[in-house]
Image (spheres, rainbow, N blue to C red):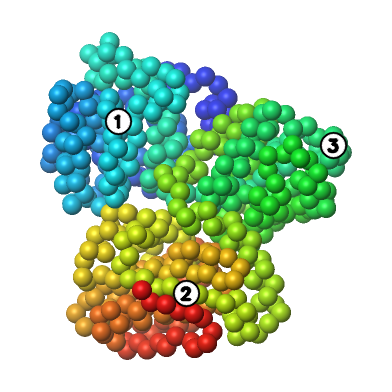
Amino acid sequence: MSFELQNIIFNSDLTRRTLLDYKSKIRNTKKYKIQVFRNHSFELIEHTISMYLDYAEINVEFNYSGYDDSFSFLELDLSSDMIIVWVDTDRYKNRNAEEILLDRIKQLKLKYLRPVLVIPLGMKFTFELVGVTIFNLNEIQENYGIELIDERTLKATGTRLSNSAMLLVSRILGLKYLPALLKPLLKCIVLDLDNTLYKGVLGEDGIQGIKLTDEHKYLQKKLKELSESGFFLSIASKNEMDDVKKLFYERKDFILDFDDFAYVCASWEAKTDMIAKTAAFLNIGIDSLLFVDDNIGELSSVKMAFPNIHQILALNNAMITAKVLNEYPGLFKLNISSEDLKRKDDVKANKLRKDLQHQMSKEEYIKSLELKLDFYCNKREHLQRVSELANKTNQFIFNYKRYSLAEVEKYIEEKEYTIVTISLADKLSDSGLIGVCIGHLINEYVEIEECFISCRALGRGIDDVIVLGAIKIILDNYNVDLVRVAFKRGERNKPAEKFVIQYLQKYLEQPEWFKYIFPDNLINVSIN
């Protein structure tokens, strides 16, 4: 279904009638509840968004408040997965709409901890609140050059938005904002080479014979931007590795460099094997990968082996492929963190670490890295990263708690909760904030409600120091010795399950006495 939708969405002029007639085909997936508070009509957006949500693999049920300029949120449904505040600021006349809405949303966030998306028409909002995202509709006119407002539509549709603007808002919400707020981001784009990144076949046309069209340059530029924003790029190509290396070193007109790729698999093995190796090297799940290839047969065989992988069919017109990438659900970031910028270098350093592991004993290996662990308690500056890690970590996670930004902020303010964040650095790279452990004081013991570690930090031989050390810090914070660990087995968290069985088994059923001593002379540990 995804290739069919890709063709319709990105390779044709979509009309309102096509979007209105489309019937959602999403089945057997979680249904997200989105509550819409509005003072002008949102219904026409909902009626034209189903195709985009299907492409994003999101099943949504919209629920509406009554029309309310005061935005009192009296009809608030706390079970909603997300709230949209859909506001026409022109209705406030001479009053400051931004100031009014800021006050209302501050009150809302005292009760509602999940994501809130504010979409103002008219005035451009600039306020910043934890857990609140703003999508200013004025940006549509600025970025796309279409008329935003048509006063003639108000009586017929209940909104001043022009027809073309409404269609574009449906597209942007369905492909970008809703996926970014409801689902984890993708992590890696796996790329074929021949007739994907350029026109031609390397093995037949040679390094100088392949053609880098203007459209392929644009595609490579888009990929470069995604790499620089923190997404991994990798190659899965049926070519000789030496030829691929020479290609990137000799073709000076390429936008992408060989070093832009976190992992390169160039051989004559099956693409399914290349995909598996890529996921294993990056230590991420297959469902975090986006595979781009011009061969529909290769795409189909990979999809059969890995049903949860995401895919793009690369087209002869690379400009369209670039457009698909630009709007592909899961590639739109609401913000870019410092950890995003460190990710590529950290993964490349992991290869060097693995080589060292094979050459030394565990103690010698750890000493050689000059590891430095920093533990922090309830650090407000880490709010964004805690929520980000909670919503994308899958392999090393104890309890699958997907904390929103507002929930993390609430926990930091409550005395019964301690959030320990862990940063990691060594002589090869600075990994940044890589782990979180959350403890809840219950009477005379602490329950470890959640613990999650970035895949980039796993396998360095210090998982025990990171997790057990964080638990010790939480217990010391409350001056208690008893701990209970909450754990839920899932499809993807086998590494966490293995760790729990090895180190924390006896703490699963009831609170038990806990003692841990940081290893001397191996790791530089600081507690802040």
Alpha carbon separation for disc pair 3 and 1: 50 Å
Q: Is residue 159 left or right of residue 290?
A: left
Q: For the point 42% across and 46% down, which residue is it?
A: 335
Residue matched to label 1 = 124
Looking at the image, which residue is at 45% across and 53% down?
337
* Quarter location, residue 505: bottom left
Mark 2 crowdedness (10 Å alpha carbons): few <14, some 14-19, many ≥20: many
Q: Which mark is residue 373?
A: 2
Q: Looking at the image, is mark 3 or mark 2 earlier in the sequence?
A: 3
Identify which amino acid the numbered label 2 is placed on.
Leu
* Figure check: 227 above or below 168: below
Q: Is residue 504 left or right of residue 479?
A: right
Residue 196 is situated, as x and y percent measured from the top left of the image, at 70, 37
Looking at the picture, tell me which residue is in the foreground, 273 or 113: 113
Residue lying farthest top? 152
- Quarter of the image with the C terminus is bottom left
Amino acid type for the residue under numbered disc 1: Lys
Give 255 or 436, whichever is nearer the viewer: 255
Q: Residues within 10 Å of mark 1 (few under 14, many from 20)?
A: some
- Disc 3 and disc 2: Cα gap in Å? 48 Å
Q: Secondary structure at mark 2?
A: strand
- The residue mark sitting in front, 3 or 2, is 2
Rendered image: mark on residue 218:
none
